[in-house]
Amino acid sequence: MRTAKKMGIATVAVYSDADARSPHVRQADESVRLGPPPAAESYLLADLILAAAKETGADAIHPGYGFLSERESFARACAEAGIAFIGPPPKAIAAMGDKIESKKLAKQAGVNVVPGYLGEIADTDEAVKIAGDIGYPVMMKASAGGGGKGMRLAWSEADVREGFEATKREGLASFGDDRVFIEKFIEHPRHIEIQVLGDQHGNVVYLGERECSIQRRHQKVVEEAPSPFVTPAMRKAMGEQAVALAQAVGYYSAGTVELIVSGADPTGESFYFLEMNTRLQVEHPVTEEITGLDLVEQMIRVAAGEKLAFAQADVALDGWAIETRVYAEDPYRGFLPSIGRLVRYNPPIASPSRLREGLGEGVSQSASSETSPPPAPPASGRGVVVRVDDGVAEGGEVSMFYDPMIAKLITWAPTREAATDAQVAALDAFEIEGPGHNIDFLSALMQHPRFREGALTTGFIAEEYADGFTGAPAAPELLRTLGAVAAFAATAEADRARRIDGQLGRRLRPPADWSVTIGGVDHAVRVSADGIAVDGVDLPLAMEYTPGDRMIEVEQGGETLTLRIAPVRAGFRLTTRGASHVVRVLPARIAPYAAHMIEKVAPDLSRFLLCPMPGLLVRLDVDAGDRVEPGQPLAVVEAMKMENILRATKAGTVRQVNAKAGDSLAVDAVILELE
């Protein structure tokens, strides 16, 4: 919508009841309700969307990232209604939308494909036989899947038997298609994709690659462009194969050819076709930032019949861009989805965009133009760029019906290191309260030595956080700085307390000496007019804090540290650099008595199976009286279109079952109890 408005084009939003107050509805010139929150009753109903377009007199429809599973028929229906579909032709959508058929076409076009079975699989037993013939490990994928949904990795026959039916159900629930195919899983894989762009006159170019290897449950978390693994020769080979595939199916508009690349092959020759996404990708901003192209504008111009104004030789990649996906999920609780109201939502301040401005008067006013604008010239002399793409606002609701993404944070800089540093700083300044979120985890990824080295695979998160996420490790220097900040804030709070009117006796001065405990270590901190000293060592810090502030900026040694501060019992919670730290702050004269305080012991809830998130109980695998062992599946809960298998954490006998399949459960609802 931002692009359309820049081009002078009026916009219409469609929405479900869950999105009635969403920013995209308020931003549009007109809006039309589709139906209730479930996607199957609103966004997946093409007839309703077409009716909305006709009702408002719309000339074109942009499907965005695309909820519609029947994209081919929808594109045809648009054509029949005389409404432009801003995307590829129906034939290309059909050819590439089916993962099974697209692999056959890719092979015919001379594109490398992963070994696998592309026929339809009747049942679990046949899936087990096929997986055994291919050789473990294998990947089971829903034919119409995408966005990480409908995918299961199987290392053994047991994994296939457990996951095949779940993959079929996810495919049917999310995409209306329960067909599944199986292919060889490439070990040490990197997920790299090529952005292609074509017009209706036979011209197709590739706009470089994106590295999307940082994934969790096959859903992308971090994307960057270019890839630290890809050489110019490799980029050319991959790009030319992607263009060949696009031309083979008569493709135009923006599209993405996704490849799996063997990180174990330093030659870069071991890359294989995964699928082609016939739409705009969530991660398209990183390509925009390194090329200067507005891909949405290009799609609109191509749909209007314009030619691309540039050839492959004109495409120049400048600098480095990184995107992190801010999700409503709690990494401290195993990345469980989180829903609820965005009590506070303050993204970091964005910088001016690197996309070219003033690209004409817009298609609606210059439809006779024969060519679309060329890429922007290199701008390496510019500093860091921060960009936030979101569709939420403070006070809005993160619902259980759709993808848990809250926002996309994009940074650009001349180098990868600078773009990564910019991500860390911007994530520190990103304030979200209400649902759980993954900001700390994203910051930890950006700081991880392996990420900094560019040694990425799709198994990065599983390998580096096998025991879960507890926060990014903090250096002793950072902990001392946080201790100083906590003591400074405590001094300000004490100073305000002494100024309250009507107090008996003389006004007390705030304490100067504090005992600060952080990370299990006690520090002696002195706050005076001369500065702050931690354990007898002066720290040259500059900061401001007024009681009630939620953010503090600390200047130290020419660098700025942004942190979030919240009061807790006997201290503060300080969040920065990918971790939350509970800091106990007591006046030095009182601190020795803290050792005599009785700690409250948390109740033992291990005998209960609790629902870890709001969701639908899809399946219950045990009954009262059944004996269970550690790791045994007990129930399946669906949330945000993803199935989550709940397993026993200890051995025992089921004493009581409190829920049944089909129940909608709240977080921490008791599903069953063990003896």
Image (spheres, helix red, strand yellow):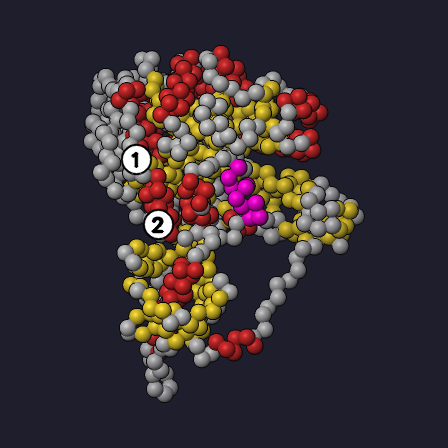
Q: Residues within 10 Å of mark 2 (few under 14, many from 20)?
A: some
Residue that extends furthest to the right in the rendered view of this protein: 625
What amino acid is at disc 2? Ala
243 relative to 48, above or below: above
338 relative to 571, above or below: above
Locate residue 308: give its quadrant: top left
Q: Nearer the viewer, residue 559 or 495?
A: 559
- Say what secondary structure mark 2 lies in: helix
Q: Position of residue 251 (x, y in %)?
A: 39, 17
Residue at numbered disc 1:
319
Tell me which residue sits at (53%, 46%) in the image. Answer: 465
Is residue 466 one of those drawn in magenta? yes
Residue at numbered disc 2:
425
Locate residue 167: give its quadrant: top right
Tell me which residue sits at (47%, 78%) in the image. Answer: 590
Residue that extends furthest to the front in the rendered view of this protein: 266
Question: CA separation, marks 2 and 1?
Answer: 19 Å
Instruction: Give, as a single range, the part of the protein colored magenta.
Output: 459-468
